[in-house]
Amino acid sequence: DAGVIQSPRHEVTEMGQEVTLRCKPISGHNSLFWYRQTMMRGLELLIYFNNNVPIDDSGMPEDRFSAKMPNASFSTLKIQPSEPRDSAVYFCASSLSPEWTGLADNEQFFGPGTRLTVL
Amino acid sequence: QQQVKQSPQSLIVQKGGISIINCAYENTAFDYFPWYQQFPGKGPALLIAIRPDVSEKKEGRFTISFNKSAKQFSLHIMDSQPGDSATYFCAASGYGGSQGNLIFGKGTKLSVKP
């Protein structure tokens, strides 16, 4: 199994530009999560999807951020326009079950992350 | 009420020693407490997890101790090895059917000296 795949691994862009981060979850997994990691704030959940439907986007910082999951094997996180304070590592994670059981099928598998730098 | 407070921020241990990381939570609705391990340049990976119906769970050199009344849980790494050097995150979740919203601690950077 290839695990969760994220692209690009590194992105450097200038303030004001549009940034699109991509994620391919583990095949067969029904839940997908986007996180942001910074030194100051640690790991923050931005949004998660169950069966391709956004369930909770309360962590999305502001309207500049949007996420889509057009099918079970692909999701995007878009920032438009980007700002220097968006610089962080963005992780995508997936888990098997959309129903909360607190058991192994709720384990979240993280991708390698995208390191975003906005100049 | 949604926070998970983790300490210490960093920890240096000699090879063979015991590493102890502590976490505290406030939301009594939490019923799943995982620990994640993250190596530089990698995503976090689940290390071990516990439900509140047990007070301790052990997997190899890693043990979670859970104190429900104090709303605290800790990770103990016995016989710490240089390969254990990583950042460790505690987390909590469980909203009676609402999946997925893992609340993470700020992390502990562990360095095991040879």
Image (cartoon, helix red, strand yellow):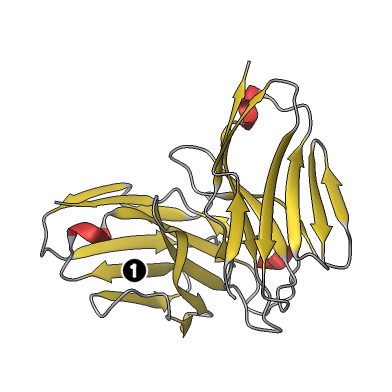
Q: Is residue B55 above or below residue A29?
A: above
Query: Closer to the camera, B98 or A4?
Result: B98
Crowd rating for badge 1 (residues with CA inside 10 Å; few <14, some 14–19, many 20+): some
Name the side, left or right, on which B37 lies relative to A44: right
Q: Residue furthest front?
A: B70
Q: Position of residue B109 (x, y in %)?
A: 54, 39
Residue at 25% over, 64% down: A20
Amino acid at circle 1: Thr
Name the side, left or right, on which B106 lies relative to A100: left
Query: Closer to the camera, A10 or B65?
Result: B65
Q: Position of residue A49 (x, y in %)?
A: 49, 77
Name which quarter of the figure residue B34 lies in: bottom right
Q: Is residue B72 visible?
A: yes
Q: Position of residue B57 (x, y in %)?
A: 85, 51
Q: How many marks?
A: 1
Q: Position of residue B55 (x, y in %)?
A: 88, 58
> Which quadrant is the N terminus of chain B positioned in?
bottom right
Residue at 89% over, 62% down: B54
* Residue identifier under label 1: A76
Q: Is residue B70 above or below residue B12?
A: below
Name which quarter of the figure residue B4 lies in: bottom right
Where disc 1 sits, the SS reads: strand
Residue at 76% over, 67% down: A103
Q: Is residue A58 above or below residue A76?
A: below
Query: Closer to the camera, B66 or B45?
Result: B66
